[in-house]
Image (cartoon, rainbow, N blue to C red):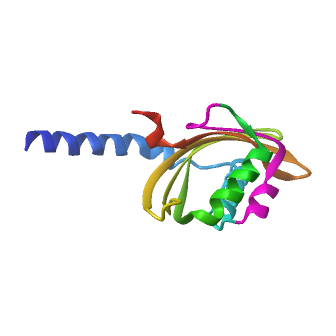
Amino acid sequence: MVRCVERILFCLAVLLLSVPLFAQEWSAEQKEALAFEVAYWKAYADRDQAATLALTHDDYRGWSYGDTLPAGKTIAKMQFAHSFPATKLFYHEVTPISILVRGDVAVVHYVVYGHSSNEKGEHETGELRWTDTLIKEGGKWLLLGDHGGPTSELGN
């Protein structure tokens, strides 16, 4: 019983300490970068390969936790072509942690919680942790680079 109370108190302390982090006010520039992330994940969730790739810079480089090396837009296109028809994202929620905007470059740290089905049709619920680097060209944000993936792959 004591251990259960300790866990509850610990969880409450963590929640109370994290409230200022999530309760922060975003500037107009940060909101714009966050709006890009929401749009990107909507296209991804809709399994809209054309829209997802249209939001991705031609010089894109991404490195998922499980990948040995970073990959470019051509590899991302091949992965989408394979995985989009075979999987489904039922629900997702993008939670920003930190957004840094300097001119035409933004770095966005965020977590995505979601429920999906894998290629075997098995349902999965999980958390993804991502850091995205965005670049603004022609007044439009594009994904230039990212790093992250399922937190289950971190080996914690």
Q: Residue furthest left?
A: 1
The N terminus is located in which quarter?
A: top left
Q: Is residue 55 above or below residue 97?
A: below
Residue 125 location, x and y as percent? Answer: 43, 57
Residue at 74 percent of width and 52 percent of height = 78
Residue at 49 percent of width and 58 percent of height = 114
Within the image, what quadrant is residue 35 found in?
bottom right
Q: Which residues are magenta?
A: 48-68
Q: Residue furthest right?
A: 138
Task: Give left or right: position of 149 versus 43.
Answer: left
Residue 70 location, x and y as percent? Answer: 70, 34
Q: Is residue 11 above or below residue 44?
A: above
Q: Is residue 42 above or below residue 64?
A: below
Q: Is residue 109 visible?
A: yes
Q: Is residue 28 visible?
A: no
Residue 13 location, x and y as percent? Answer: 30, 40
Task: Give left or right: position of 150 versus 101.
Answer: left
